[in-house]
């Protein structure tokens, strides 16, 4: 069983992992187990146990089960470890999304991450070139799905407005079955009371989103934050000169797109085409 590499340039994750590694080693030694014996008990190799205790590998949840008789003290570390498993930019984005009262996003390449199924997300990361390792794909998929908790209207008062270019509905990421399940997922999410999902049809003569995908997060304190991605980096800005431009652009995109009610028949039409 492989572990996940700890980001050596991630100070926040590094501090958490040094604390966790120190506690794991102390409890293992207190239980009178060698690294090899402990590894055998949890089906880890001795080398991987050593890597975890040196803070070089992030332990998976089963590693933190109460094998060492720590009375819940090790299991209590699971939440901290769960957070640092995800890349720093994902953790930062998740924090921003948690602080937001309203999130607006336009996507013209893939389905928005908050709406993706696990298989669709995996297909997106599998398409990366240079290719990601299997562990990196698994890590990215887990991080993306973890962010989707905020969609639940019972967990907060977030309001979501999402505009998808029709091209993202028709691009068969992962194949026909994966896209069928993804389109069904869109129809489910569109029923949530705190979500407005719109589709910008390909036959529109004017599309103000040709510059690329972006999202706007309106925070509790009144600040608006814009997030955009390029092939090699992600960019976050709260500069009003930039967020105002994107806010205006997003308003225009919503006007150019079908209404949430009229978007559903188009999604259903594309879904039907995957069944023929």
Image (cartoon, grey):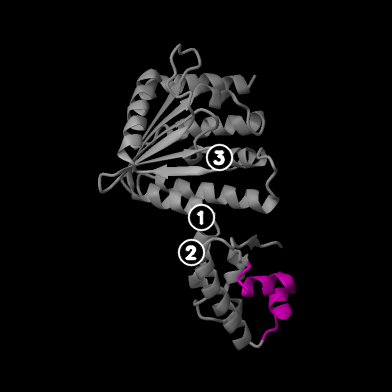
Q: Which label's residue is closer to the chain start, 3 or 1?
A: 1
Q: Which mark is residue 12?
A: 2
Q: Which label's residue is closer to the chain start, 1 or 2?
A: 2
Classify 123 as above or below 155: above
Residue 119 x, y percent position in the rendering: 61, 40
Q: Which residue does the image show at 65% across and 19% down from the upper left?
A: 276
Whether pointer 3 and pointer 2 mark residues with C-beta atoms closer than 8 Å, the reply is no
Say left or right for 83 vs 100.
right
Whether pointer 1 and pointer 2 mark residues with C-beta atoms closer than 8 Å, the reply is yes
User: Badge 3: few (under 14), some or many (20 or more) residues near its Cα, within 10 Å?
Assistant: many
Q: Nearer the viewer, mark 3 or mark 2?
A: 2
Say left or right for 143 vs 158.
right
User: Badge 1: few (under 14), some or many (20 or more) residues near its Cα, within 10 Å?
Assistant: some
Q: Nearer the viewer, residue 155 or 208?
A: 208
Classify 36 as above or below 103: below
Residue 200 x, y percent position in the rendering: 45, 21
Q: Nearer the viewer, mark 3 or mark 1?
A: 1
Start-end of magenta stretch: 33-56
Classify 167 as above or below 77: above
Disc 2 is placed on an element classified as helix
Q: Which residue does the image show at 39% across and 49% down from the upper left?
A: 96
Residue 109 x, y percent position in the rendering: 55, 30
* Mark 1, residue position: 88
Location of the N terminus (image quadrant): bottom right
């Amino acid at each position: 069983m492989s572990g996940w590499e700890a980001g050596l340039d991630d100070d926040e994750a590094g501090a958490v992992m040094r604390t966790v590694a120190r506690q794991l080693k102390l409890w293992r030694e207190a239980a009178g187990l060698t690294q090899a014996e402990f590894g055998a008990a949890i089906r880890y190799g001795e080398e991987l146990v050593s890597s975890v205790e040196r803070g070089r590998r992030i332990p998976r949840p089963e590693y933190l089960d109460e094998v060492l008789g720590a009375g819940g003290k090790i299991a209590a570390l699971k939440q901290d470890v769960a957070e640092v498993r995800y890349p720093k930019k994902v953790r930062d984005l998740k924090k921003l999304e948690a602080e937001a009262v309203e999130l607006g996003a336009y996507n013209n390449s893939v389905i928005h991450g908050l709406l993706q199924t696990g298989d669709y997300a995996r297909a997106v990361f599998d398409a990366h070139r240079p290719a990601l390792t299997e562990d990196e794909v698994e890590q990215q998929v887990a991080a993306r799905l973890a962010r989707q908790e905020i969609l639940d209207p019972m967990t907060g008062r977030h309001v979501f407005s999402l505009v998808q270019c029709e091209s993202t509905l028709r691009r068969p990421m992962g194949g026909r079955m994966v896209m069928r399940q993804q389109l069904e997922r869109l129809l489910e999410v569109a029923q949530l009371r705190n979500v407005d999902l719109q589709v910008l049809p390909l036959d529109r003569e004017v599309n103000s989103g040709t510059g690329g995908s972006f999202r706007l997060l309106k925070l509790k304190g009144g600040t608006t934050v814009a997030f955009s991605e390029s092939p090699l980096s992600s960019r976050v800005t709260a500069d009003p000169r930039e967020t105002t431009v994107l806010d205006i652009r997003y308003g225009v995109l919503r006007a150019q797109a079908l209404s949430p009610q009229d978007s559903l028949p188009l999604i259903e039409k594309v879904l039907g085409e995957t069944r023929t």
